[in-house]
Image (cartoon, rainbow, N blue to C red):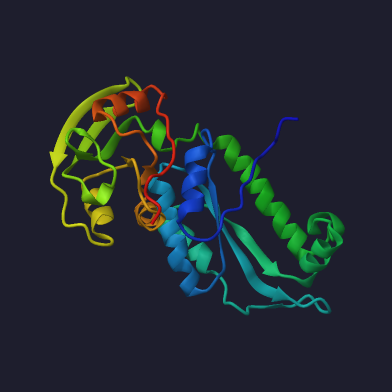
Amino acid sequence: GELDFLIIDCPPGTGDEPLTIAQLLDKPVGAIVVTTPQDVAMVNVRKSITFCKHLKLPVVGIVENMSGFVCEKCGEVTEIFKSGGAEKLSKEFGVPFLGKIPLDPLVAISGDEGKPCVLSYKESETAKAYKKITEKVVEMTKELSEPVGAKDIKKLTIAMPVSNGSLCSHFGHCEEFVLFDVDTDKKTILRERRLTPPPHEPGVLPNWLEEQGAHLIIAAGMGVKAQNLFAEKGIVVIPGVEQKQIEEIVKDYLEDKLVTGENICDH
């Protein structure tokens, strides 16, 4: 039957998995960023929020998990991992703070029983916290306008590695990068720039292409490590594209006809 919500739990950080999900889903409503309270965890949260903003993916809000330990005997909360880091960060980035979920043995118990904590222990503080967060998410997703991914940005900059006028087999060893500024609404190319890339060294091209304003890279092949580096910059990568004239590739992309095959780079 029809889903009320489809929620995909991604691993921490801004690697291949969340990038692939952002590319595969058709107009996702937004992202919920979940973190623990420690300062070291805030580093990844900053990257995740920046990643979402680069992809024009709305951040529904931040949840602080493991926010204090609830004593099962007296109900007292002890802040094992500190508290309040996520709320502070939400104010810094101007995104909603959805709430705190404490460490609670009842969550583990209900999980072992195969029943949600919010049903098994409805009156627990943790169940109440889940309920409040859920209510906020439901309300906020109603208010969100149609979300956009890289493909839905009206003015988009596409970067392609080129050799001899065609898409290069390895992005790091191309003669030049051609950057197309396109209008995705009108499906037209607004501007074309041909740039000589800097020397191929780890981490150099992601920084350079970010400086050039690239939102998207279309490539014949690109290794996983390189894709992760671009993901950290919020740049979407589409590998496995046929090596042909770049103008034809841009046209296919704008008309939703772009076909991808095997990623010819595996390192």
Image point 35% across, 49% down: which residue?
222
Q: Along the line of sight, which residue is nearer the eye, 188 or 204? A: 204
Q: Along the line of sight, which residue is nearer the eye, 211 or 178? A: 178
Residue 112 percent location from the top left of the image: 83, 64
In the rendered image, the quadrant that contains the C terminus is: bottom left
Image point 66% across, 39% down: which residue?
5
Residue 95 visible in image = no
Q: Where is 86 relative to 118, above or below?
A: below
Residue 15 percent location from the top left of the image: 45, 56
Q: Is residue 83 left or right of residue 78?
A: left
Q: Is residue 252 left or right of residue 126?
A: left
Q: How many marks?
A: 0
In the rendered image, the quadrant that contains the N terminus is: top right
**Which image quadrant for residue 121?**
bottom right
Residue 192 percent location from the top left of the image: 17, 31
Residue 174 visible in image = yes
Image point 27% across, 43% down: which residue?
214
